[in-house]
Image: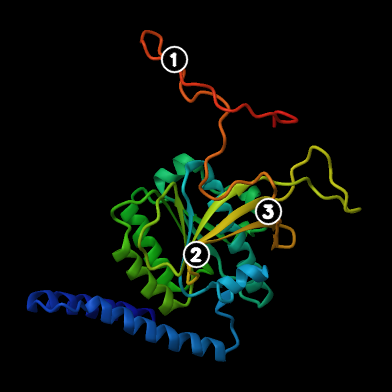
Amino acid sequence: MAQNALARERLFALRETIAKLEGKPAPALAAAEREALASGKAARQAVERNGRGLHLPFGVAPLDEAMEGGLPLDAIIEFRAALSRDAGAASGLAMAVAARLQKREADAGRLLPLLWIGDAVGTLEAGRPYAPGLLDFGLNPERFLHAAPRKLDEALWLAETAVESAAFLAVVFEVRGNPAHFGLTESRRLILRTRAARRPLFVVRQAGEEEASSAAFRLHVESAPSGLRPLPDRSKLSGSIGNPIFRLTLEKSRNPAPLSFLLEWNPHEREFLPVAEPGFARPPGEQSAHSGAQLSAPANGSHRSQAMGALLAFERAS
């Protein structure tokens, strides 16, 4: 089936070239997308008949309802961090989703590995996966493969080949920013392969802006304040740090407006838990308050330093 998808892609490219030579307004790529949607629908129906789920639910009812059942497993899902400081949050949420998928497939007797393709520039900024940390986070390091291509073109080729092979539980493609060589055209090629192989591709975008893509969902991920670690008697351990909490915003979905959720990841049970919005939390994208001047006065200039803002008092420094 993966070979059929490659043959269709070549046919679509030929149609596109002929359409341009004939000056026809209707591009062949639109026909390609319609045919891919039709073949993807047929594949989904066949899989449903075989009893295998096509969605991975988060286990949080409002979020799963907004995503029409959860994350589709034959599509591209993008986890986007707008700032470099949230790159770990985007990677962490992708790993949590992969761990949840790994557990479900292992319970069904399917032990396929997970492939993580790291971007060279992104690795310098955010580091690479660490095996003991993966284990603590709920992933099985024995079924975790990491690749580090030197160039983006090589990483993109590897992602396409890995998805097409259907040999991996999922493929994670890490990319930094919005490179010119990975745009809408490349994502269209990838979506054909994911639908043919019925395997998901998770795109982890570090410090990137929103852009057009063939992703079924784009999730804007930020880190959120963690609570105290719970004890067996349901009390809280003072001064401790509990499970990681993510602020997830559905940027691209069928919902008319972005929806935001706070999710706690339990690595032992490999499940997400909804978290109530704290009173001090800020809306997504809003900058935190600053109690002082942004810039100091110049050493040898006539300009004065900026006026101080409103002073904020806290019970403790951190």
Q: Position of residue 118 (x, y in %)?
A: 45, 51
Indicate whether 232 appears above or below 55: above
**SS for tag 1?**
loop
- Residue under label 3: 277
Q: Position of residue 120 (x, y in %)?
A: 40, 46
Indicate whether 70 appears above or below 236: below
Q: Is 259 on the left or on the right of 173, as rendered?
A: right
Identify the image's colour scheme: rainbow, by chain, secondary structure or one colour.
rainbow
Task: Tell me which numbered mark, 1 or 3, is placed earlier along the sequence.
Answer: 3
Q: Is 140 on the left or on the right of 81, as rendered?
A: right
Q: Position of residue 247 (x, y in %)?
A: 60, 53
**SS for tag 3?**
loop
Name the amino acid, label 1: Ala
- Residue displayed at 70% across by 57% down: 275
- How many numbered discs, if any? 3
Quarter of the figure that contains the C terminus = top right
- Residue under label 1: 297
**Does the rendering let one see residue 7?**
no
For the residue pair 152 and 176, the one nearer the viewer reads as 176
- Residue displayed at 27% across by 78% down: 30
Q: Position of residue 281 (x, y in %)?
A: 64, 46
Q: Quadrant of residue 96?
A: bottom right
Label pair 3/2, CB-CB below 8 angstroms: no
- Residue under label 2: 257
Task: Tell me which numbered mark, 3 or 2, is placed earlier along the sequence.
Answer: 2
Q: Is 11 on the left or on the right of 137, as rendered?
A: left
Give me the C-alpha separation between circle 3 and circle 2: 19 Å
Extreme residue toward the left, this view: 22
